[in-house]
Image (cartoon, rainbow, N blue to C red):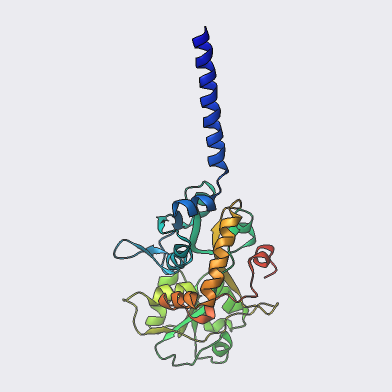
Amino acid sequence: MKNAKRALISGFIAYAMLAATTVQSEAESTRENIFSSGKITIGIHNQAPWGFRGPDGEATGFHPDLIRSAFKPLGVTEIEFIISDFGALIPGLLAQRIDVVASGLAVTPARCEQVAFSEPDLAIGDALIVKEGNPHNLHSYADISANPNVLIGGSRGSANMGNAIASGIPTPQIQQFQNTEASVSAIMAGRVQAVTFSTATVVSVLSDPKITGLERATPFQGFVKPNGLPAANYAAIAFRKNDLDLRDAYNERLAALKADGTLTAIMEKYGFTTEEEAPDFIVTAKLCSGEQ
């Protein structure tokens, strides 16, 4: 009988110790776990220039380089990149299959209801592809409107095509195509003199070695909204809402990388210009509220 009681008490103590250990483990935040283990898992969607598998099989791109620059000095040296469909990135984050999404995700009010964004790193607005040398000297939608001999193309239904129309380019000068590939084919064949895409799409198109004789028109003034701000999306890193301490640690590193020129160097490496660096007055809180 005594032995049975001792066994029962011993079992209860063991269970209590296990429960206490479990609670302690569960209480450890994502940030604490990442910093103590030196490991972090990042979701990307295999799309240049954001984040993709390079020829050597390693993850490369703007956001992988930025993440490495941000976290390695903090002792987080084991950085695993998990490729996912774009639409599965946020669900994967919320299901804790990854720690962070770093793949060109734009800050929107709807997404802000699901995740906590860092401060923005890039402004992704309108960009223009023209023939090499920019023979028509196109640096704004107004330049296109002013030259009736210039036709502009773009993907039907895209935000950038919509911005070109909203800027006042006459309808006869606008040619809409099924997709990016058809638009690029049109300018290469001389059927249009310019095509409008997002800056990220322009960077991706021009990085293709099969695309020759084209360049990006720089500088370029895209559509300006009635509030005086350029029509643009702002890319940022996404965290779970209960990982605000991890988000804040990243924001501190992002500010440092902006200040020391690392962000600019990474941008230039992947075809972005200084025009795409998100200005300091654009802040996540106002993007989430729809004020910016």
- Is residue 176 among what the camera can see? no
Out of 16 and 29, give the one closest to the viewer. Answer: 16
Quarter containing the C terminus = bottom right
Q: For this view, does 35 lie left or right of residue 132? A: right
Q: Residue furthest left?
A: 56
- Is residue 188 among what the camera can see? yes
Q: Quadrant of residue 265?
A: bottom left
Compared to 212, does 78 lie above or below?
A: above
Residue 266, percent from left and from top: 44, 74
Residue 124, percent from left and from top: 54, 73
Q: Residue at x 48, y 80 (%)?
A: 273
Q: Residue at x 48, y 66 (%)?
A: 70
So how many labels did they put on this image?
0
Out of 224 and 53, give the one closest to the viewer. Answer: 53
Residue 242, percent from left and from top: 60, 50
Q: Residue at x 57, y 59 (%)?
A: 247
Residue 264, percent from left and from top: 48, 78
